[in-house]
């Protein structure tokens, strides 16, 4: 099976090509020249497919991050995945960024990503809890023994590790998670995970 995984929801773009459990290509792209990294998604996908002497029609499964994260990045990720899966007649499956980051914890993960308005998108006890007030999250942290993974903005407030400062192989984790997930892979069911509505204006 050949899996093409990509993520434009977080601070960098992760693109991975995997065949029968082996990584063929794994790339990380950062924003540059005042452009969102998602602007380079299509060209990067074409490059890694060509470099491995494959064609788009060889792809069996598309794996994407569906959020939470950058609203622009979420839209780009899901839209490209749906269009490709429809055109190539292959499966497309999404995983949340919170579930991806939870795989980076050594034990009992608590994942908190900035949701603005003194809130964070929270994953704890194996579940996505939504956008939760930071004070409530601080109390949860005091009450348990958690491996905390967060972002640069919240790390000074909540402690733990910022995923932005670590070298977690997030694209590779995404590909592996989707391959394990029980799903029919119908691209029509692939939808963005908007825990909060996009900002207006």
Image (cartoon, helix red, strand yellow):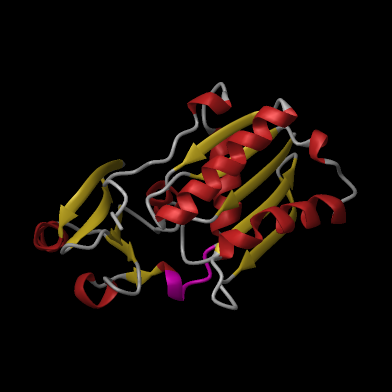
How many marks can you see?
A: 0
Query: In the picture provided, is 6 more to the left or to the right than 113?
Result: right
Q: Magenta stretch? A: 164-168
Give the overall secondary structure of the magenta segment.
loop
Residue at 73%, 57% in the rendered image: 43
Whether residue 30 is situated above or below residue 74 in the rendered picture:
below
Q: Residue furthest front?
A: 201
Q: Is residue 36 magenta?
A: no
Q: Quadrant of the C terminus?
A: bottom left
Residue 103 x, y percent position in the rendering: 45, 52
Query: In the picture provided, is 68 more to the left or to the right than 17?
Result: left
Residue 134 x, y percent position in the rendering: 15, 62
Q: Quadrant of residue 133?
A: bottom left
Residue 109 x, y percent position in the rendering: 32, 54
Residue at 63%, 47% in the rendered image: 5
Query: In the picture provided, is 169 more to the left or to the right than 57?
Result: left
Q: Quadrant of residue 13?
A: bottom right
Q: Quadrant of the N terminus?
A: top right
Q: Is residue 167 magenta?
A: yes
Whether residue 124 is situated above or below residue 28 in the rendered picture:
above
Report the front residue among 177 and 154.
154
Residue 47 x, y percent position in the rendering: 80, 57
């Amino acid at each position: 099976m050949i899996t093409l995984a990509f993520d434009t929801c977080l601070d960098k773009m992760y693109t991975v090509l995997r065949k029968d459990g082996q990584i063929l290509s794994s790339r990380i792209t950062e924003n540059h020249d005042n452009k969102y990294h998602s602007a380079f998604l299509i060209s990067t996908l074409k490059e890694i497919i060509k470099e491995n002497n494959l064609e788009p029609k060889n792809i069996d499964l598309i794996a994407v991050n569906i959020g939470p994260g950058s609203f622009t990045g979420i839209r780009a990720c899901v839209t490209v995945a749906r269009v490709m899966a429809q055109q190539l007649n292959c499966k497309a499956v999404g995983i949340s960024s919170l579930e991806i980051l939870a795989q980076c914890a050594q034990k009992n993960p608590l994942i908190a990503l900035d949701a603005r308005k003194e809130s964070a998108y929270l994953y704890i006890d194996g579940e996505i809890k939504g956008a939760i007030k930071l004070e409530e999250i601080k109390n949860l942290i005091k009450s348990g023994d958690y491996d905390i993974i967060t972002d640069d903005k919240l790390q000074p407030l909540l402690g733990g590790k910022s995923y932005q400062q670590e070298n977690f192989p997030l694209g590779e984790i995404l590909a592996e998670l989707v391959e394990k997930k029980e799903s029919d892979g119908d691209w029509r069911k692939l939808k963005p995970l908007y825990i909060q509505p996009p900002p207006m204006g």
